[in-house]
């Protein structure tokens, strides 16, 4: 029990320290995050996750370490979809590049809380009602097939989001200021800024993506600590990944099919778990190979010219 408390407490303190270091030191002054800086931070987060994985190997054993690594790769690959949403929202609301890191920081902070609720609830449900794993699996297969045949040209209209409409009815909307505030007080009345609306939509989008990603990672492990830590490491590195690849996201046009295949695979894995348990090593190899092949196909096959 004491070991478990130390592990949880140590990880949560690490997350708090890194968030404070990020916002209070390295990004204390708002600035445009360049690709070089983003790549460095992406490397830092991946390195920290791998070091943490080594720690799990020596404290909890090789099986738990493999579960963490596979869960981390699954969550990292599925979170790429979030990047497309970030690009859409920042472009739609014309958010200045120097303000984007601030929005993503608070978005990640909210996502950590939401993911924690989903993970603890998901593990508790599976432990209490094992049959629910088949519902999760069927849902992932359905989501993968749906993603495969989804029209890329479907437009998203953030201004029509019912949550945004509801918030606008409660608070008046003010223009952004240079400080990048989420709220402004005008004539003693509290106003929200468009930046707050973007933050709200990012939280909603993460909630939607969590519905897919949490069941997917639960197919890898039912250990709450492994699921939570691998999930949080992937989310914490999402901001730097966004700034590193946002300029070239259009090049990964076949990645959607790879993600659809991964979702379908983990869904099938959950559905047949009582008949045959697919080894974690096989799952990891399949996921890595699918991502690599999707990216290579996007690079090698030329895009069709627009009419």
Image (tube, helix red, strand yellow):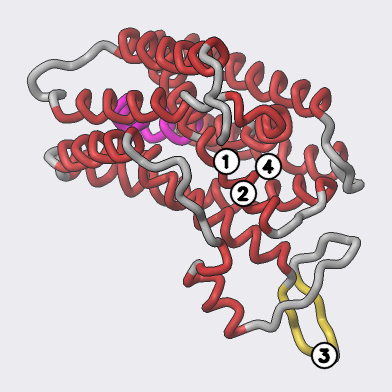
Disc 1 from disc 4: Cα separation: 27 Å
Name the residue: 33% across, 49% down.
Answer: 121
Disc 4 from disc 3: Cα separation: 34 Å
| Residue range highlighted in magenta | 216-230
Asked if the residue under mark 2 is in contact with the one under mark 1, i.e. CB atoms within 8 Å, the reply is yes
Label 1: how many Cα within 10 Å (few below 14, some 14–19, many 20+): some
Residue 51 disc label: none
Q: Which residue is mark 2?
A: 88
On-image quarter of the C terminus:
top right
Disc 2 from disc 3: Cα separation: 33 Å
- Mark 1 or 4, which is nearer the eye? 1
Of residue 229 and residue 260, the one placed in the foreground of this image is 260
In this picture, residue 243 sits left or right of residue 122: right
Q: In which quadrant of the rendered view does residue 22 lie?
A: top right
Q: Which residue is mark 3?
A: 188
Relative vertical location of residue 237 with respect to residue 153 in this rendering, above or below: above
Of residue 163 and residue 88, the one placed in the foreground of this image is 88
x and y percentages locating residue 267 in the rendered image: 24, 30
Q: Which residue is mark 4?
A: 16
Judged from the image, the secondary structure of the residue bearing numbered disc 3 is loop
Whether residue 24 is in magenta: the answer is no
Name the residue: 83% across, 60% down.
Answer: 180
Name the residue: 87% across, 40% down.
Answer: 25
Residue 84 disc label: 1
Of residue 146 and residue 151, the one placed in the foreground of this image is 151
């Amino acid at each position: 029990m004491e070991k478990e408390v130390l592990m949880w407490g140590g990880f949560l303190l690490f997350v708090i320290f890194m968030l404070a270091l990020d916002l209070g030191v390295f990004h204390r002054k708002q600035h445009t995050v360049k690709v070089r800086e983003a790549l460095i931070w992406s490397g830092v987060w991946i390195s920290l996750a791998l070091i943490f994985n080594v720690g799990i190997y020596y404290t909890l054993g090789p099986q738990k370490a493999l579960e963490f690594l596979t869960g981390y790769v699954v969550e990292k690959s599925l979170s790429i979809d979030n990047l497309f949403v970030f690009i859409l929202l920042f472009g739609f609301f014309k958010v200045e590049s120097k303000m984007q890191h601030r929005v993503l920081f608070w978005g990640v902070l909210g996502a950590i809380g939401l993911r924690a609720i989903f993970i603890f609830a998901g593990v508790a449900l599976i432990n209490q009602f094992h049959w629910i794993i088949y519902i999760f699996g069927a849902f992932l297969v359905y989501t993968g097939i749906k993603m495969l045949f989804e029209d890329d040209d479907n437009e998203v209209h953030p201004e029509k989001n019912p949550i945004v409409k509801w918030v606008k009815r409660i608070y008046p909307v003010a223009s952004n200021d240079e400080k990048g505030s989420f709220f402004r007080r005008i004539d003693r009345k509290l106003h929200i800024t468009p930046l707050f609306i973007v933050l709200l939509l990012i939280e909603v989008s993460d909630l939607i993506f969590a519905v897919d990603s949490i069941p997917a990672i639960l197919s890898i492990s039912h250990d709450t600590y492994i699921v939570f830590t691998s999930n949080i490491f992937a989310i914490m590195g999402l901001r730097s990944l966004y700034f590193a690849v946002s300029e070239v996201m259009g090049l990964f046009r076949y990645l959607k099919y790879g993600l659809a295949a991964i979702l379908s695979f983990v869904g099938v894995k959950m559905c047949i778990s009582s008949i045959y348990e697919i080894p974690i090593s096989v799952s990891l190899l399949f996921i890595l190979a699918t991502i690599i092949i999707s990216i290579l196909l996007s690079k090698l096959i030329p895009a069709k010219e627009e009419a």
